[in-house]
Image (cartoon, grey):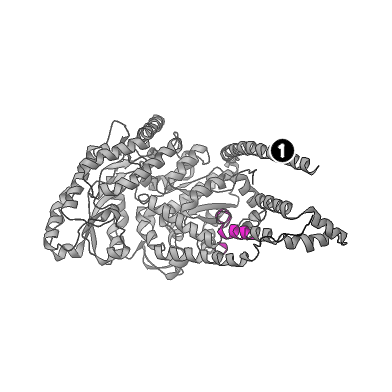
Amino acid sequence: MFLRNKKRGLISLVTILLLSVVLSACGGKNNNEIAQTGASNSPLPKATDEAMEDKLKPYELVLYFFGDPQKDTELIEQKVNEYIQPKINASVKINFVPWGEADQKIPVFLASGQKIDVLFAQAGHMVPLATKGALNPVNDLLEKHGQDVLKSMYSKFLDLTKVNGQNYGIQNPKEIASQWVLRFNEPLLQKYEIDASSVTSIASAASVLKQFKEKDPTIYPIEPTRQAAWYVPFDYVMNENVPFGMVYEPVASDGKIVSLWETPEAQQALETMREYYKAGYIRPDVATYNRPESEEQAGNWLTGISGGIPTAEVIWSNRAGFDVSYKPVEKPIVTTNAVMGSMLTIPMTSEDPERAMMFINMLHGDVYLHNLFVYGIEGVHYEKVSDNVVRDLPARKERWNTGWFQFGNGFITYLTEADPADKWEQFKKFNDEAQVSPLVGFMFDPTPVQAEIAAIQNVSAEVRLPLITGSVEPEQFLPKVNEKLKAAGSDKVIAEMQNQYDAWKATQ
Amino acid sequence: MLFNAGLVPFYMMVTQVLNLKDTIWALILPLSVNAFYIIVMRTFYRTTIEEGMIESAKIDGAGDFSIFVRMVLPISLPGIATIGLFSALAYWNDWFNAMLFIDKQELTPLQYMLSRIQSNLQYLLENTDSLSTSNAMTIANLPQETIRMAMVVVATVPIVLAYPFFQRFFIQGLTVGSIKG
């Protein structure tokens, strides 16, 4: 009797287990579908034409920016509300999502139908959300309510950032390009009376390095960072650990995705680095050396390559504690990540996209409102030194410390005392000079080749640093690297990238 | 445990039906019942508590309630302690619920703070080019490695200390010889 009971129990348990496995598999799938359709099916923006007819109804705008939650959020909300209430009859609720979690949280928020009116986004967030249909296209809205926005955005922004023929992101104007520069330790240059003004490339820095090494053999002149003095004009489809993309100087015009290590440009750069390494310009253990921050401040370095923007010397000098200058080694280059580095979007879950657009327009045109978001409240978080120059008070760092580039028109941001007066003119010039990478606007979806990409990243982790620091002989090492990459599936990944690139190009 | 509707319905349930967003209950309720623990406990009862013991208590005149309190509970202490330890660990290590539901700083659990620092750091390192301007500033604000390691130690110590206290409940052979024949 007992035994039979047990047996029956066992059978039913097994059945339940089996059933549940089957069911939960279905569940998982459904769930994805819900997540996707949920977002696209969410109530369409109610025609706001009626709302516009007489006057605007009161409305609460829910804003999501990135960063850690700030203590003075409510205080800022109050001030913002006081200011925008009379103008667009709206109030705001400010939220922050920590940088590293946005990828996980934002899609859940939107799929669950949670109301968000204005959402900060970068390329990596905007494109997948737009493809899923979770964002409102902004072209018409811009025409209607975004006059100030259209004036302040980078002129080619809308052309470069279309997803399936429409625009979903509104640029927060700032620098749209990046540029590799060689930075120099000014006091050391002066001490040994070395002239670095003729440096325009890594190769042309050779004479400076040579002079320095002769005068002071105790210091390795090149900074032992993860970048050392490595420069190739190459734009990656994903990032430097998946070394596939296109050369942009001279611009690759054939539209073919290639492997970095097979380009003549990379081979040239590898040889230069190897020369420098052999000449003793960089410490021999650089590939495994983890440079402590204090070493930068100690000043026992002469030069190194770094991502630069106008006025970067101010930031570097502040951090190092002595004068740091820089010389560009290329023209500024517009890349996907730089041009889409800071955008505001209007999700489908917004109940009043037009109002959201009006608000974004104010962030672009209204100096007071924009700076309220950036610096906080005058007298509490900052004080004014002159008309557009401010000084932080301690409360700014403790209670309202936000990423300044998220809140609309960066070019109307007040300057700090360390900034040159023409900071924003320099930025605009930088933007205008920039050349466009052939990959701009293209976002790769790595899901079909995830396993291969993981394997390739492992190979990169192993070979990249020894190669770019000149620690190994490129002639012997490079063929092995290419073999390893092939074994890891580089052909498949490049083919997939090419497919997606061609498909994307066709929609442009 | 086996059936799971997924993240989005879970999120909707907690925030829109139960209205628990930004409350401490969002950290407590989702972890309070776990199907796996129930199965563990059930198996534990089935294997350690013999029919005969309950019968003997009945013969001595005990009712259902006093059988439960005076016989079953004391014998199942090791099981309860195990589940207690599991739950304690689960609550202590939980950062995911906090990530989804907690925006208020004063409710942020330690583990969530650690994971946030880690994920932010990761993000900044991966996206240095798109954040170039603010990069220098933001990285300067991040805690150094030493401080992060100190936080890890602080986060581990309480749970390591808890172990010896649970140890005394893990007694073997509690019921050896309770049934004869």
Relative side of A415 to A201, left or right: right
In front here: A497 or A158? A497
Residue B91 belongs to the span the image colors magenta: yes
Residue A358 belongs to the span the image colors magenta: no
Percent position of residue B99, x then y: 54, 55
Q: Secondary structure at mark 1?
A: helix
Percent position of residue A407, x then y: 44, 54
Relative side of A248 to A341, left or right: left
Magenta highlight: main SS = helix
Q: Is residue A377 visible?
A: no
Disc 1 target residue: A11
Where residue B171 sits, quadrant-wise, is bottom right
- Residue under the image location 72 percent in, 52 percent down: B47
**From the viewer's perspective, is residue A425 above or below residue A16?**
below
Relative side of A223 to B116, left or right: left
Subunit that carries the residue with mark 1: A
Number of on-image labels: 1
Residue at the outermost front position: B181
Q: Is residue A127 visible?
A: yes
In front here: B177 or B40? B177
Relative side of A445 to A326, left or right: right
Amino acid type, residue under disc 1 in the picture? Ile
Percent position of residue B74, x then y: 74, 63
In front here: A456 or B119? A456
In front here: A243 or A398? A243
Circle 1 residues within 10 Å: few <14, some 14–19, many ≥20: few
Percent position of residue A94, x then y: 53, 56
Q: Which residues are magenta?
A: B84-108
Is the C terminus of chain B in the top left, top right, bottom left or bottom right quadrant? bottom right
- Residue under the image location 31 percent in, 40 percent down: A437
**From the viewer's perspective, is residue A66 above or below residue A482?**
below
